[in-house]
Image (tube, rainbow, N blue to C red):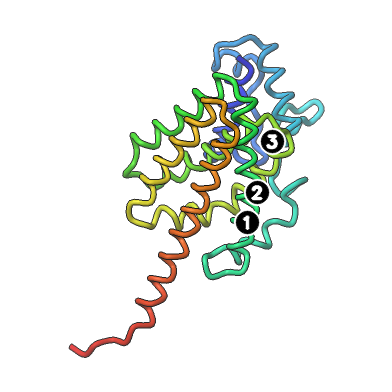
Amino acid sequence: MSERVIAGISDAVVSGELAPGDRLPPERELAGQFGVSRTVVRDAVKTLSGRGILKARRGAGNFVADPEEGVSAGLGVLAEGLSPGGEGFGDLFEVRKVLEAHAAQWAARRRSEHHVGRLRGIVEEAYRHAGDPGVLDETDARFHVAVAEASRNLVLVRVMFALLDLLATSRRETLDIAGRARLSLDEHERIIEEIERRDPEAAREAMLAHLISVESAIRFSDRQRARQGSAPKTEE
């Protein structure tokens, strides 16, 4: 039950429904919203605070932590270099391949049925809204955070939340490529299958293959646009 509350609040943060600085509703209201006891809500909030997602203020309540604090401090300066032509783009995917491949590997070892159900729910939602770039952007972010949460590694979850804004550039680039969104969803399905089967090495390989596929597609698309932009104009 605590995991359900954690997932609900995490999704609200990823989607922007809860923004940095927003105050969470009182425990009683959250308990009614999720259909759990106040003790369960209290445990979930404690876990999210430990992950750096929430921050308690004495006498004021619980608030969504500012992403500029802690792990993500200083990351904002990288944003301008994360376009495919920027020097930071390749660096970002190098880090993603290391972190997220291991996240999938650990998730296959440590996941619960709740984690698998959450991952499947996110992908099913994305399939239902395959023509809506906004929903696909949000569900993609939620999927990768959910894999990190299934790994049960506190530091990894905090890093993934810190990287959300930086990953937004590559997500937007991906959605601009014809057919890429559907291919990513199919690749997400394979990752889930390996996590559900509790096959750590296969899950790691599935995530790595997905990230390599996305990076290659973005770079190819960028080269295509560059060639089109440099092609000589024909006279009418």
Say which amino acid is labelled 3: Ile
Say which amino acid is labelled 2: Val
Say whether marks 3 and 2 touch (CB < 8 Å). no
Of residue 9 and residue 221, the one placed in the foreground of this image is 221
| SS class, disc 3 | loop
Counting from the top left corner in percent of width and height, residue 112 is at 59, 20
Residue 135 in sight here? no
Q: Quadrant of residue 93?
A: bottom right
Label number found at residue 94: 1
The residue under the point 46% across, 60% down is 218
- Identify the mark nearer the N-term, 3 or 2: 3
Q: What residue is disc 3 on? A: 53
- Left or right relative to 15: residue 44: right
Label number found at residue 98: 2
- Identify the mark nearer the N-term, 3 or 1: 3
Counting from the top left corner in percent of width and height, residue 62 is at 71, 28
The residue under the point 33% across, 34% down is 128
Counting from the top left corner in percent of width and height, residue 87 is at 61, 69
Question: Marks 1/2: CA distance?
Answer: 7 Å
Q: Residues within 10 Å of mark 3 (few under 14, many from 20)?
A: many
The residue under the point 61% across, 31% down is 107
